[in-house]
Amino acid sequence: MSDDTVRTVERIELLTAETSEGPQELLTRDQTKSSEIGREVGSVLRLDGHSFDPNSVDYERRDDETMIINMGPSHPSTHGVLRLMLELDGEFVLRTKPVIGYLHTGMEKTGEELSYVQGATNVTRMDYLSPVINELCYSMAVEKLLGIEVPERAVWIRMMMSELNRMSSHLVWMATNGMDLGSTSMMIYGLRERELILAFFEKTAGLRLNLNYVRPGGVAADLPDGWQDDALVICDTIFERTYEYDQLLTGQPIFRQRLIGVAPMTAEEALALGVTGPLLRSTGVAWDLRRTMPYLAYDQVEFDVIVGTYGDNFDRYAIRLNEIRESIRIVRQCIDLMPSGDYRSQDPKVTPPPRARIGESMEALIHHFKLFTEGFHVPEGEVYMAVESPRGELGCYLVSDGGPKPYRLHTRAPSFVNLQAVPLLMRGGMVSDAITVISTVDPVMGEVDR
Amino acid sequence: MIALSPSAPPGVLTSEAHCADLCCYPTREQYFSLIESFKADDFEMCVDLCGVDYLEHPGRSLPQGVVRTRFEVVVNLLSLSKKQRVRVRVQAGDGEPEVASLFTLYPGTEAMEREAFDLFGVLFTDHPDLTRILMPEEWEGHPLRKDYGSGRVPVQFKEAPGPR
């Protein structure tokens, strides 16, 4: 055990002046401190934190018995640019270390350069599978600091769009998960159903993926004429097809064997690691922010929080499949209960005036000019707003210094935190199960790296 | 607003906060034991930990008696059983910010602390693996600091000159 290669707080010069790519990677055992190995094999979740479990798969291993290999960053099953370093003993995974940052584009820094109105275009690109929910979280944080109320119709539109987005996100997950497990038909079906939702998004917001639809003060546009019919068709079609997925996957023996009992996690481990979303619910903890800390109008609609028992891959699969059905329930209620009224706040400091008013009103012209050159000023303060994204708790920590741009915009990305469960879930499993673990943890790398 | 638990270190300043039941302002010495008392008080999860650089905004509003420093580490704790949120803002220091690592209390802070180190240069004592996480190893400086020269190097996708 040599400590020269280990970078610690006492050796600051190594922290900042390191030129090799090495230390972020998984090192061989003789180069790794016992506390770090303890973390990598997950023993920190047990007992006093550093002791090894004698029954553990990698109790007293030597380096010549094992092999360290790379998986990624451009492996088809890594859903982007996740790079995993695996320590293998034959076919079994002993240690795992996710190496991330390949998609880091400094979006939090960019957020400080953009005004509050422009900010939504930035955050929507973080979790590119659930853009509406990213915008929602950001907008709600801004509105909290501004102290403005959003009209009721805007709240319900936001809620409906969030749920449609949750469906599309879970459908992509169903598709890629099917693909990872060799069911290429599911890949086609999942993307086919998602297309319905994207078409609705295009009709509503003009864009398919990065919508910039939810903005501080409300939403960008009212729902298009005949939206009820479109939404109903989406609900009916996808609801019916979820039962086709059941026939294709849920009851299929090979698929079940690949998932059931593989990579289980306990509730204690999930809580300790800060894991949220379907991963946490799969362990039996009924924690869904839509229910436990309601925002928007989630306290006025009926839906069930889907909870698993064993925390294994199959539970995570079943939770996501059933959450699609619950989202359909919520969308149906949104169609019935959608109130009429404004779709954005009428506060002229936040919402630009209608085009027709600019020609006739001096005030409208001034507001329009100020809003699009400088943006609105947000009172000084800080706020942490959390919503339930398809992947877990999406948080937005926003600091304002009273100016027109955020002083600090931090996103608590659920995938970033959930990724810490990967070493724990993969440990002791086979390499082929490692693929299913990445798949069921469902990291979106745009959000992990931001 | 909720009260601090009796096991919390004495003298921690608190205030109300947006979207949280309590905001605490411990000193660096009180920080770890305060979080420990929250953990014992059924705050099962540390949802978020991030750094903030207040270089350009030193006059932020803080309760009377909080010694302002340039860097702040903000921790958001969540209690699932009580459905409460608590925010802890610790003044981390000016030149070489350093606070205790929460890794032994909440193992899930491992990646978040690495991120705060990577982007702000906040050091976390006793963190098991304090390396860069988002930036490449050879990167110089901490990009989310306010005095970091963003835009210093013109964007060029081939053969970018000089140090990054």
Image (cartoon, rainbow, N blue to C red):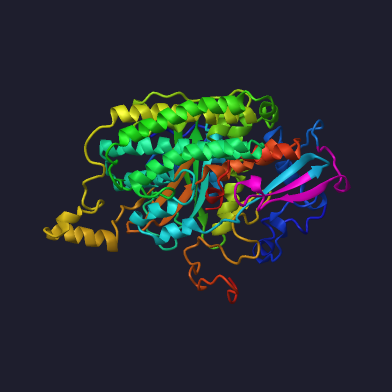
Q: Is residue B121 left or right of residue B17?
A: right
Q: Is residue B83 above or below residue A19?
A: above
Could you tell me residue B106's position as x and y percent? 60, 39
The image quarter containing residue A337 is top left
**Outermost right residue:** A64
Furthest residue to the bottom? B161
A84 inside magenta stretch: yes
Q: Is residue A446 visible?
A: yes
Horizontally, residue A288 falls left or right of residue A203, namely right
Could you tell me if residue A441 is visible in this image?
A: no
Is residue A43 in the magenta section?
Answer: no
Highlighted magenta segment, given as a residue range:
A58-87
Locate residue A125, reporting x and y percent.
46, 52
**Picture residue at 60% right of the left edge, 36% below the top:** A185
Nearer to me, A78 or A396? A78
Above or below, A242 against B150 in this view is above
Whole-percent x, y for residue A352 in the image? 24, 54
Between residues A396 and A315, which one lies in front from this camera angle?
Answer: A315
Give the residue displayed 55% in from the left and 46% down from the top.
Answer: A444
In the image, taking residue A180 as reference, residue B38 lies left or right, namely left
Residue drawn at x 45%, y 54% is B67
Q: In which quadrant of the rendered view does residue A65 lie?
A: top right
Along the line of sight, which residue is nearer the eye, A182 or A168? Answer: A182
Residue furthest left as drawn: A360
* Percent coordinates x, y for residue B111 in the rendering: 60, 47
Tally the numbered discs: 0
